[in-house]
Image (cartoon, helix red, strand yellow):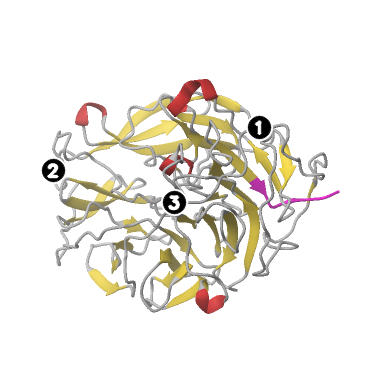
């Protein structure tokens, strides 16, 4: 397929990312019977139809985390501080040692398929795994994918609940794959990018990928995805099997991130059109902080990021991609503290635009506002509710067993009715995935 080249080269520099760490005392551990259980744990709850933050805690007071026995796989508990129903959905085996990790792919990648009947998670040294998308969240099988380029680079189709996409590094061939999970597992090559106009080499040092900070694809009918190989970035339409544009980007390891509306892309803080021509620049002190692209209910695309520096700092700062206007949703300007470390954002609620989930580790004690919390926010109204303590230690001190692997890497569901997060249950022997069910209330 032929395509126009970008009329203006995209040459963007790479900035560093730093993580502040604090040293504090661990007060709980995995599955100790002497830790008190929540008295509401035996209540299975009931599912109701309501807005995600309805009846939730929306204040900025301290709601300290209290010790809690680690639940068994499939067991639900009520968060003692926030009253939400949470279920442990995986069962990593401590005997696996450092491989006892079953987690979400990343905050920017949907875990649920389009109709929320299936979940994809990642098991260290076992690969990607398929689970039921609802109770009892049973493990189904390991997925026989052909060597995805990285853990996070596996994408659910935004419409078809049976299809995944991923760039493969099998034999270093630059191929984008389609994988069907139903009725049986099957793979096919969507496109091989060795030929013009992309000219991707068969080279282990220049693999086809979604970039170093991957995000999901466009949500529209063209199914546009941003890719790169070597120093070349490009946009590709799965629906049309066409490369839409190509440009050089030697100064960044990232790929263009396609708007949900499929009207443009963003790369390192620069807003681009579909020809990869620069349209505007977002006002951010550091465009490389954790972020997730999303969409407001009002209809515009958004870039939702953590901001540690600049005039508008916050755990969630939302930027309009059509105007570059920004607003602090969670930050000092709205009554919240300076953003804690290890904060991740998930804006992939395509069927409930405007809703974003934020997962925070911070100092891990859970004693103060936002510390070790899972939070929900609405970009249109500015509403914020606090829905869970993550109970994860991660890399907050040198004593942490798991570091990156047990960061929350929170993922919001397509309908914004559930939120996944990872936890090592305060430096325990496994990392598992938990789900907050916002539809559930006490009976």
Specify which label sits upstream in the sequence, 3 or 2.
3
Q: Position of residue 383 (x, y in %)?
A: 62, 70
Checking the image for residue 302, the label placed there is: none
Q: Nearer the viewer, residue 269 or 82?
A: 82
Q: Nearer the viewer, residue 373 or 217?
A: 373
Q: Position of residue 82 (x, y in %)?
A: 71, 56
In this figure, which residue is indicated by the disc labeled 2? 199
Graded by Cα atoms within 10 Å as few (under 14), some (14 to 19) or many (20 or more), the crowding at tag 3 reads: many
Q: Position of residue 36 (x, y in %)?
A: 75, 40
Q: Nearer the viewer, residue 352 or 426?
A: 426
Q: Secondary structure at mark 1?
A: loop
Span highlighted in magenta in the image: 436-443
Q: Secondary structure at mark 3?
A: loop
In this figure, which residue is indicated by the disc labeled 3? 108
Tell me the CA gap for discs 2 and 1. 53 Å
Q: Compared with residue 283, is residue 228 higher up or lower down, i.e. above or below?
A: above
Q: Nearer the viewer, mark 3 or mark 2?
A: 3
Q: Position of residue 432 (x, y in %)?
A: 55, 35
In this figure, which residue is indicated by the disc labeled 1? 31
Graded by Cα atoms within 10 Å as few (under 14), some (14 to 19) or many (20 or more), the crowding at tag 2 reads: some
Q: Secondary structure at mark 2?
A: loop
Tell me the CA gap for discs 1 and 3. 30 Å
Is residue 437 part of the magenta span, yes or no?
Answer: yes
Specify which label sits upstream in the sequence, 1 or 3.
1
Q: Nearer the viewer, mark 2 or mark 1?
A: 1
Q: How many marks?
A: 3
Q: Nearer the viewer, residue 19 or 33?
A: 33
Specify which label sits upstream in the sequence, 2 or 1.
1
Tell me the CA gap for discs 3 and 2. 28 Å
Q: What residue is at 19 percent from the left and 62 percent from the top?
A: 13
Q: What residue is at 62 percent from the left and 51 percent from the top?
A: 389
Find the residue positioned furthest to the top.
95
């Amino acid at each position: 397929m032929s395509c126009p080249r970008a009329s203006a080269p995209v040459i963007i520099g790479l900035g560093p990312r730093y993580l502040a760490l604090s040293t504090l005392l661990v007060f709980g551990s995995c599955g100790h019977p002497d830790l008190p259980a929540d008295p509401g744990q035996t209540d299975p709850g009931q599912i109701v139809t309501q807005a995600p933050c309805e009846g939730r805690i929306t204040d900025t007071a301290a709601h300290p985390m209290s010790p809690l026995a680690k639940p068994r796989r499939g067991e639900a508990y009520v968060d003692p501080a926030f009253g939400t129903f949470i279920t442990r959905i995986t069962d990593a085996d401590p005997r696996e040692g450092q491989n006892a990790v079953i987690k979400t792919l990343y905050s920017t990648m949907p875990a649920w398929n389009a109709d929320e009947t299936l979940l994809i998670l990642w098991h260290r040294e076992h690969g990607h795994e398929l689970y039921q998308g609802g109770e009892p969240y049973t493990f189904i099988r390991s997925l026989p994918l052909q060597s995805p380029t990285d853990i996070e680079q596996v994408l659910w189709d935004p419409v078809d609940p049976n299809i995944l996409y991923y760039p493969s590094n099998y034999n270093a061939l630059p191929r984008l794959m389609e994988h069907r999970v139903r009725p049986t597992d099957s793979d096919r090559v969507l496109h091989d990018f060795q030929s013009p106009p992309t000219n991707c080499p068969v080279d282990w040092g220049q693999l086809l990928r979604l970039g170093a900070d991957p995000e999901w694809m466009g949500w529209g009918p063209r199914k546009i995805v941003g890719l790169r190989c070597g120093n070349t970035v490009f946009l590709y339409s799965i629906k049309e099997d066409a490369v839409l544009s190509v440009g050089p980007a030697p100064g960044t390891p990232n790929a263009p991130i396609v708007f949900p509306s499929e009207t443009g892309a963003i790369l390192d803080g620069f807003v681009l059109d579909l020809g990869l021509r620069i349209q505007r620049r977002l006002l951010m002190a550091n465009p490389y902080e954790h972020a997730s692209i999303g969409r407001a209910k009002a209809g515009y695309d958004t870039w939702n990021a953590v901001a540690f520096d600049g005039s508008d700092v916050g755990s969630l700062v939302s930027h309009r991609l059509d105007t570059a206007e920004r607003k602090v949703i969670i930050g000092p300007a709205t009554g919240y503290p300076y953003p804690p470390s290890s904060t991740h954002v998930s804006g992939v609620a395509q069927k409930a635009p405007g809703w974003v989930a934020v997962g925070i580790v911070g100092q891990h004690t859970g004693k103060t506002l936002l510390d070790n919390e899972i939070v929900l926010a609405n970009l249109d109204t500015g509403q914020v509710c606090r829905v869970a303590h993550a109970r994860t230690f991660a890399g907050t001190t040198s004593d942490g067993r798991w570091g990156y692997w047990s960061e929350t890497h929170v993922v919001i569901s397509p309908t914004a009715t559930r939120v996944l997060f990872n936890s090592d249950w305060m430096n325990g022997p496994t990392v598992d995935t938990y789900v907050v069910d916002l539809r559930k209330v006490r009976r």
